[in-house]
Image (cartoon, grey):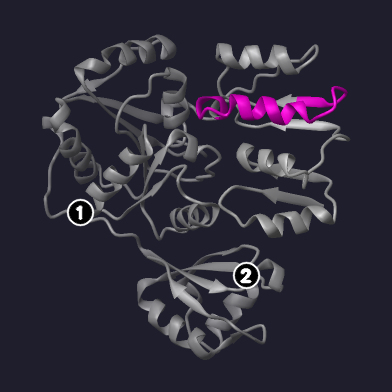
């Protein structure tokens, strides 16, 4: 049995789940700490401790919280530490919490020779216009724009929306439901642009991504490699565009040193600009009440929509089933018809209220 303990979710139901026992507990540091302090979670008999994305948790300031959580565990445990990078603070953590650890390094699967990298040097006030010009010139089908902060994510997403480029921001201020909805919409083609922090982008499973844009260059060149490695996968080519100012030249130097090749620097003036350009996704997502715990399956939804609702199978895209909700990607022309049916119709014999995600 697995129990998920995440912040942003009600505390009570989590306590109820823990009362029935669990073989595996997966959680965020803050919420795990809360349960341990209230003694609703006991891990004195824990056999295996897994710290995933350890470098990001340290970057986010969770060092003391993680130390406290580890203090509740028996010293006889096995400890597995996963980290995309291996800076000094991770080495120190390993020395403090592991005994005779074995280090395993996995090479990245992506090949940077299929990723076209270009760097655009700008004045600070030119950054936003250059970002828009990148979309107008390359016209990508899907893009992730990386930013440093949550506030910057929101500002950039708003900038794109104000210029007829539909975009969604994803960062640490989103609760789990909001994060799930953003990722569902991006993966099912009802959102074409994601504006993300590095922390929020960890774990994103994007099979086909046309372009990555660095709104600013990261300080750590390894983070740059991880960012651009999200495009150019599965034998496809990809675009990695970076905007930087003169003050970020040292970051350019670090990237060149890590990649052992010079960065291709171009002028924003080389980009074709088109103020009439618009980017709207081909699909729309509707949310349906009822999910996995209600015994709803993708086939049940597909059957209802192509049967009683009268939609064509070609109008229906990806279907995602969560515990209590389901998400369906539809062509724009099919949304009204689907919602009209679901207002009074049923799926698997039960009412199925639905709404369009905006």
Q: Is residue 213 visible?
A: yes
Crowdedness near tag 1: few (<14), some (14–19) or many (≥20) residues, C-alpha within 10 Å: few
Judge from the rendering whether residue 89 lies leftward or rightward of residue 137; answer left or right: right
Q: Which numbered dot is residue 298?
A: 2
Residue 13, quarter of picture = bottom right
In the structure shown, which secondary structural element does the residue marked by tag 2 occupy? Answer: helix
Where is residue 118 drawn, in percent x and y?
A: 28, 26
Give the extent of the magenta segment. Answer: 57-79
Upstream in sequence: badge 2 or badge 1: 1
Name the residue carrying label 1. 162
Q: How many marks?
A: 2
**Quick one: which residue is furthest to the front in this view?**
38
In which quadrant of the rendered view does residue 51 lie? top right
The image quadrant where one finds the C terminus is: bottom left
- Bin the neighbour count of mark 2 within 10 Å (Cα to Cα): few under 14, some 14-19, many 20 and up: some
- Relative to 200, residue 287 above or below: below
């Amino acid at each position: 049995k697995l129990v998920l303990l995440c912040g942003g979710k009600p505390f009570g139901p989590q306590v109820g789940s823990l009362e029935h026992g669990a073989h595996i507990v997966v959680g965020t540091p803050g919420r795990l700490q809360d349960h341990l302090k209230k003694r609703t979670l006991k891990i004195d008999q824990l056999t295996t401790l897994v710290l995933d994305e350890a470098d990001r948790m340290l970057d986010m300031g969770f060092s003391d919280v993680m130390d406290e959580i580890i203090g509740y565990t028996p010293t006889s445990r096995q400890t597995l530490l996963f980290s995309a990078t291996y800076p000094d603070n991770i080495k120190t953590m390993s020395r403090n919490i592991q005994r005779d650890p074995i280090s395993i390094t996995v090479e990245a699967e992506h090949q940077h020779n299929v990723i076209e990298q270009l760097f655009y040097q700008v004045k600070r006030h030119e950054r936003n216009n250059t970002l828009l010009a990148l979309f107008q010139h390359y016209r990508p089908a899907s893009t992730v724009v990386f930013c440093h902060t949550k506030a910057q994510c929101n500002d950039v997403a708003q900038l794109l929306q104000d210029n007829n480029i539909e975009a969604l921001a994803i960062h640490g201020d989103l609760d789990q439901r909001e994060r799930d909805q953003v990722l569902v919409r991006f993966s099912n083609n009802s959102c074409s642009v994601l504006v993300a922090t590095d922390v929020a982008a960890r774990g994103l499973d994007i099979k086909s991504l046309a372009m990555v844009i660095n709104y600013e260059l990261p300080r750590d060149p390894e983070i740059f490699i991880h960012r651009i490695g999200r495009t150019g996968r599965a034998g496809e080519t990809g675009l990695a565009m970076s905007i930087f100012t003169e003050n970020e030249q040292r970051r350019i130097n670090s990237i060149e040193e890590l990649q052992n090749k010079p960065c291709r620097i171009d002028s924003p003036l080389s980009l074709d600009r088109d103020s009439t350009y618009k980017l709207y996704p081909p699909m729309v997502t509707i949310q349906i009440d009822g999910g996995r715990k209600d015994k709803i399956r993708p086939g049940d939804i597909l059957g209802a929509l192509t049967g009683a609702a009268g939609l064509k199978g070609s109008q229906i895209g990806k279907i995602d089933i969560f515990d209590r909700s389901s998400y369906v990607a539809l062509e724009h022309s099919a949304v009204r018809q689907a919602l009209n049916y679901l207002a009074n119709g049923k799926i698997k014999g039960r009412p199925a209220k639905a709404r369009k995600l905006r």
